[in-house]
Amino acid sequence: MVGSKDDPNERDAGVVDEIVAYVTSTPPRSFFLFAGAGSGKTRTLVAVLRKLTGIGPGSAQIESKPAAGDLDLRFARELRARAQTIRVITYTKNAALVVTGRLGNNDLTQVATIHSFCWDLIAGFDDDIRDALLALNALALEKAREAATGRKKGPTDKDKKTIAEFEAKAVALSATQRFTYSPDRKRYGDGALSHAEVLSVAAWLLKQKPTLRRILRDQHPVILIDESQDTMKSVLDALLEVVAEAPSRLMLGLLGDHRQRIYMDGHADLPSIIPPEWATPKLEMNHRSQRRIVDLINEIWDSDLEGRTQSKKAVRQHPREEKSSGLVRVFIGGTAATPEEKLRREALCESAMEAATGAAEWRPGNPGHKILALEHALVARRGDFLQVFEALALLDPDSVRPDATGDTSGPAAVQVLLREMIDLADCVNGGQVSSDFAVTEVLHRYDRLLNLPADGEARAQQLKAYQRAVEDFAAACSNPSATVREVLAPIVQSSLFEPDKRLLAAFNDTRPPPDAPESRQKEGVENRLARGWHTLFASPWSQIRRFKTYLSGNSHLATHQVVKGSEFEHVMVVMDDEDAGGFLFAYDRLFGSPLGDSDVKNVETHKETSIDRTLRLLYVTCSRAKESLALVLWARDAGQALAYAQKNKWFLPAEVQPIPE
C-alpha cells in the first residue's frame, strides 16, 4: 500500500481496507466515516462493496476457493449461503443510481433511498402499520390537547379544529384495512402513506416490534447509510437501538459529513451520538477543489463566530498536490438596490471573474458557471421565469421547487405544458414544423393517434384538424411575445392533446381574477387558484421552458440547498437575506451584523442558531467549486461588511471587493 509519506495524494489509501476489516471482523464493528466535501465518499463506498462481495474490478471472484486470510471473500460466500444482502441507503434516487451504476451487476447488495428501504421493511404488515399510525396520531392528539388546555383564554377555534382532525383521523385509520405507498409518485385515498409517514412508521415499528428487528438482521447483517447527517432522526435512532441490541448480528456503517447537514430532519450533531466503541475512519483528501478553495472551506469551519454553538469537530481537508491554485473573490454591496439593479451589477461581478480567471465560462449568460441563490424566487428572477414560477407556486407550491431528491415534476394540472407542448415545440423551427416525422412521433408518444375515427373520411378530417392545430401552435410558440394562453389555444381548440380538466376549466373561465390579499391576510384556496391560473395564462410562453429546465436540475441556476452532492468548475454564490425574506439563514451575521434576539436566547440555552445553519450552508456552497468561486453579498451595511471581510482570515486582502457599479 502506498503511504501518505510516499504520495500525499494517497493519504486515504488504506480506508477501504480499514472499513472492510470492521465488517468482516468477529464480531463486526460499526463505524462512522468522516467524509468531507469532494473526498471521494461514493468511490470509497463502491470499493468497499466490491471487496466485501468479491464482485467487480479489482476483486477476486468468490467462485474460487478463498485462501485462509481472504476474510472478505469468506464474508461474501456466507452472505450468499444465507440469502442475505448488504443494504445501502442513500438520500436521493440519483445517488442510488450513481452507486449502482458504478457498482455494476452485484446481487449481494441492495441500494435504495431511505424511503424505499423503510417501505420494503414494513410493506404488507398492514395491522402493524395501522397500530403505528394510531399510536403516532394519539401522541399528536395528546400534544394538541395539552397546548389547548394550557392557554389562558381557553382553546382557540384553531385548537378545536386541530383536535377534531386528529380524532377523525383515528376513526379513519381504524377502518383502513390496507396501506399503500409509492416512492416515485404521490398516492391519494384511504391507506395511502406519505413519504414522512413511511419513515415515522418504520421507526416506530423497529422500536416496538422485536420480530421486525429480527427480520431486518436476518436479511441484512450490514447496513451502510450514505449522507447519514440528513437521515431522519427517528429512523437513525431506531437503527442505532437495533445495533445496540445485537451488535454481533447487525453492523451499521454511517457515511457523511455533519458540516453538510442542511435539512432539519437529521441530528444536529451526529458525531456526538456515535457510541464510543464505534470506529471513526476518516477521508482527509479533497479531490475536487483547488487549494485556495479547500483552504477557504477549512477556515470557514474553524471560525470562532459570535452566536456559534455547533462543535468544530471535523476532519481538516487536504487538496491534491497538483491542485495548487484556485481563485476566490467576495463582492459586497448594499441590499437596498432594486432587483433589476442587483441583476445588472451581479453581471458585472461575472465579468470581473472572467477578467480575473481568463475563463470565458464566467461571461454573463454563459452556462459554464453555476449561480446559487438562497431562495427559489430569487433563482426564478435571475433565470427570467419569475412570472411562471409565481403562477405555478399559487397552484401547487410543493411541486415547483426542485429538491435534492430529484422527484419534483411541477403541478399535475399543467403537465400538458411541461411535457406534450414542450416536446411539440422541439419540432418547431422559425415558425415552421421542422419535421413531420418528429411531430408524428410526439403524437404517438402521448397516444394521440390511437383513437382516430375508423371511417376514412372522418379520419382524414381529424388528421387535417390536427395538422392545422400544429401549424397554429408552431406560429404561436415562435412569437417571442406569445403568452401561455396564446400557445395553448390551438391545443385546446383541436384537442390535439388531452389537458387536465382543471386546466380546461380555468382556460374557459373568462372572469377577471380576484385581487391579491393584503399582507398577512389569509387567502381562500379558490381565490388563490384563480389568481394562479390567470397569471399563468398571461405569462410569456418562453418562460415555460426555462422553468422546466430549472425544475429538472439542468439550469445553470440553483438554490444553495439543492446542489449538495454536486460539483461545478466555477460557482457564484449570491447571498441576500433581505430578498430571501426568511429567518433560518442570515449571511449578514457571518459578516459582522449583530445577532437577533432569538439567536441570543439560543446561545444561552446552547441551541442551534442562524449562525450555525448559515455557516453549514456556506460550507456546502463554497465546496461545490472546483476552480474558482465568487461570493456576492448584498448586505444591510455594505461598508461595515466590507471592513469585516477585509479583517476576516477567510479572505486575502485582494479578494475582498465592492460590487462593481
Image: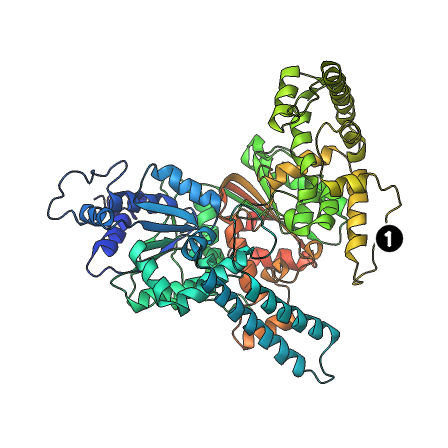
Q: Residue 206 falls in which quadrant of the image?
A: bottom left
Q: Which residue is mark 1?
A: 515
The quarter in which the N terminus is drawn is top left
Whole-percent x, y for residue 131 in the image: 49, 67
Say if 454 sits above or below 561 in the image. Answer: above
Say if 154 sits above or below 110 in the image. Answer: below
Q: How is the image coloured?
A: rainbow
Whole-percent x, y for residue 383 in the image: 68, 39
Camera-side residue of 340 and 464: 464
The quarter in which the C terminus is drawn is top right
Camera-side residue of 341 and 443: 443
Callout 1 secondary element:
loop
Label 1 neighbour load within 10 Å: few <14, some 14-19, many 20+: few
Whether residue 380 is visible? yes
Camera-side residue of 321 and 526: 526
Whole-percent x, y for residue 463 in the image: 72, 18
Most distant residue in the front direction: 455
Say if 347 sits above or below 317 in the image. Answer: above
Q: Is residue 320 left or right of residue 92?
A: left
Say if 356 sits above or below 80 in the image. Answer: above
Q: Amino acid at mark 1?
A: Asp
Camera-side residue of 159 and 334: 159
Whether residue 435 is visible? no
Q: Residue at position x 67%, y 16% from top?
A: 434
Most distant residue in the bottom direction: 152
Q: Residue at position x 24%, y 59% from top?
A: 28
